[in-house]
Amino acid sequence: MKHSLRLQATAARRRCTGESHQSLVGLIDGAPLPIPCAAGTEQAELEASVFLRICRVGSMTPHPAGIVRVRPEPDCLSVRLVDEPYVVQYWAERILPVVHDAGLDPREGITGVYGLRYRITGSSVELYRPGSSALIRLEGFNRRWWELAAARRRLTAKATFDLPQWTGAERLAVRLVQEDNWEPAQLLSPLLRRIRATASGGPCNNTSTWFNDVALRVETTFVPVCAEMTALLCQGPTALGWTVEREHCVCHLPAYKGSCIIEFSAPGQPPIHYSSLRWDSDDLSEEPGARIAELNARALRP
């Protein structure tokens, strides 16, 4: 196959995941490369729970939630993070579970991803739940930063992430979340596997998502062109099964400050409400480099 055809075969997937063409060449079979969906319920649930908690890392980097790229596989998701201590600290603080108040509903008394544990292997941090084959592999940073953040997390409250098995409260919290569908895994897991599709070429990108009991809300800052994003999410080899129901797009009015708004639907799932804040450089309140240096210095303090 000619080089130009090979590039075309990986283009949509690369735009969604941030993977390099070289890393995908061996997967080409003559057709555009798809993105593997989560292999099973437990993998999707782990990805959804992590995504909901880390998506508000902020907008100091061109990488949404600090994610440079993802590598989706049937039973694993590898995530390369920005090589910045404050991003690693944020991830650890948001997902490692601790008990703040054992007397509360466990969904409120425990913060972090219920049942989440970690191990250091080679150059990565592996996130898993005991008794499950679901796995998220974090890469691209100094593992000492993670250990430092975990040590700080232990000081804030009673840590459960060091325990070899689930606690009863964690299992109850997961059951209650599943019963109320607070973390719609079949929406969130595929979106995380395509997180780069929601980023523009701007200097600072953030993609936030949350569930408000009625719909999944997705919000971006430096928005990609809506037509490009919807093509990646709704058409071709990278489509995740969403359909555009209604759309108010102002991408063709670059000076206009209003939001683009899209309502998606997915079979058997809550509606998805998307909006872009359409930030530009004037929306940055301070120099990102100076702020990042400050955050990194704070993250590295013992």
Image (cartoon, rainbow, N blue to C red):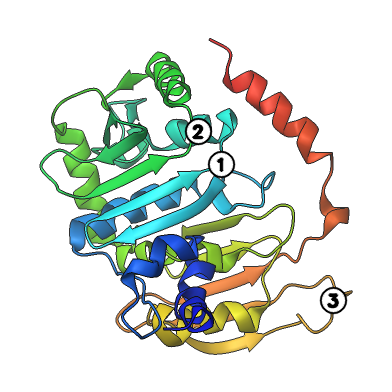
Residue 57 - label: none
* Residue at the image point whose x is 42% and y is 82% from the top: 242
Q: Is residue 108 visible?
A: yes
* Residue located at (48% from left, 58% from top): 210
Label number found at residue 88: 2
Give the class, few, some or many, for how many residues have Cα within 10 Å of label 2's Cα (few <14, many ≥20): many
Residue bearing mark 3: 254
Residue at left offset 22%, top offset 37%: 170
- The residue identified by callout 1 is 82
Image spot of residue 293 (x, y percent):
72, 27
Looking at the image, tell me whether mark 1 or mark 2 is earlier in sequence order.
1
Residue 226 picture location, percent across and down: 64, 79
Foreground: disc 1 or disc 3: 1
Q: Observer-nearest residue: 144 or 248? A: 144
- Residue 38 drawn above or below residue 290: below
- Amino acid type, residue under disc 3 in the picture: Pro
Dot 2 amino acid type: Val
Name the foreground residue: 31 vs 13: 31
Q: Earlier in the sequence, mark 2 or mark 3?
A: 2
Q: Are marks 1 and 3 in contact (CB under 8 Å)?
A: no
Q: Residue furthest bottom?
A: 245
Q: Is residue 1 above or below residue 93?
A: below
The residue nearer to you, when weighing 101 against 268, is 268
Q: Is residue 235 above or below residue 77?
A: below
Looking at numbered disc 1 in the image, what kind of residue is underneath it? Val
Residue 148 screen position, x and y as percent = 45, 18
Residue 159 picture quarter? top left
